[in-house]
Amino acid sequence: MIIVIKHGADKAQVENLKGLLKSKNIEPHVSQGSLQTVIGCVGDVAQIDPGLIEALDVVESVQRIQEPYKAANRKFHPDDTVVCAGEAKIGGGHFGVIAGPCSVESEAQIVEVARAVKAAGADMLRGGAFKPRTSPYSFQGLGKLGLDFLLTAKKETGLPIVTELMDFKDIELFNDVDVIQIGARNMQNFNLLKEVGAYTDKPILLKRGMSATLQELLMSAEYVMASGNPNVILCERGIRTFETAMRNTLDLGVVPVLRRSTHLPIIVDPSHATGYSYLVDPVSVAAAAIGADGLIIEVHNDPQRAKCDGAQSQTPAMFAATMARIRKTRAALS
């Protein structure tokens, strides 16, 4: 249920309303928008008579939410959420680009890539220290050493870092990480989502599962937000279909669909979506044109020798060219 507060309402009356809701075991979440203030009610609202609430002097209107997700719902929070990591911002008109290798392989490698992507205009550095791989014989990442190398690259360049958390037992290793990624395979690991949401208010980059519906993605975001962390970034990274020409099928149409449903930032991963570096550039431009809030792109200084996903990784030169085209596209649309 959403309660819309009258413009210029008395603050004491608003506090009294919040107290009334709490007395009925309803958690009120106040969202101060540019045009109006709303109170989102989280809990069992069946016991509340909307007519009695609407009769209060401080209340403009009461709306019931039919969707099962509340905190992620745009009705709950009419204005776009802006998620910040260091000086980088994503959402609310801020377009953010996250770039770097699929996996951290050495200190020299990640520092070289970090310098290159920053020079090209990237806002954040990505790199996997813990890697979920389909085969148990594939490179699984450097673990804590990989995180140490990422922090070295952050110190060298000033770029906030983004890396994936696979197991909550490792969470204390992520104290200096700026954005925690929850990968597609863990999108519905609800215990992990609840634990991360309760433990930290750092931005959580949540990737859509390869067979997940948009409602399932939003419900996963809801787990994080309901546990206490409102800073969620949604990521479309392609879904599994019958098509085999690409690694996955990129569902770009989700960007405007999600825009109507949620206030959370929406970014696109053209690397995992397509699986081929030559497709990353046109898909990135298309994502920017359709209104995405950002991109997460794999960049490697030597893709042919990459230990993970070399085929879909751009070289620094390719990435710089893509960034130039994205800037032109966004300038033309503005």
Image (cartoon, rainbow, N blue to C red):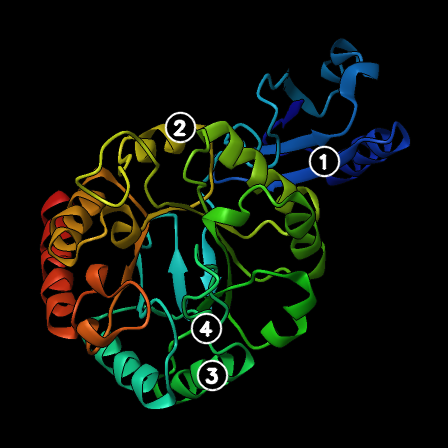
**Residue at image point 30% right, 51% down:** 272
Q: Depth check: 133 or 137 in front? A: 137
The residue to which callout 3 is attached is: 151
**Residue at image point 37% right, 86% down:** 106
N-terminal-most mark, 2 or 3? 3
Q: Nearer the viewer, mark 4 or mark 1?
A: 4
Percent position of residue 38, x then y: 61, 32
257 sits left or right of 233 in the view:
left
Percent position of residue 329, x then y: 11, 50
Q: Nearer the viewer, mark 1 or mark 2?
A: 2
N-terminal-most mark, 4 or 2? 4
Q: Are marks 4 and 2 in contact (CB under 8 Å)?
A: no
Q: Nearer the viewer, mark 4 or mark 2?
A: 4
**Residue 260's mark?**
2
Callout 1: SS: loop
- Residue 37 appears in which quarter of the rendering? top right
The residue to which callout 1 is attached is: 10
Instruction: Tell me the CA gap for discs 4 and 1.
Output: 55 Å
The residue to which callout 4 is attached is: 141
Percent position of residue 198, x then y: 72, 54
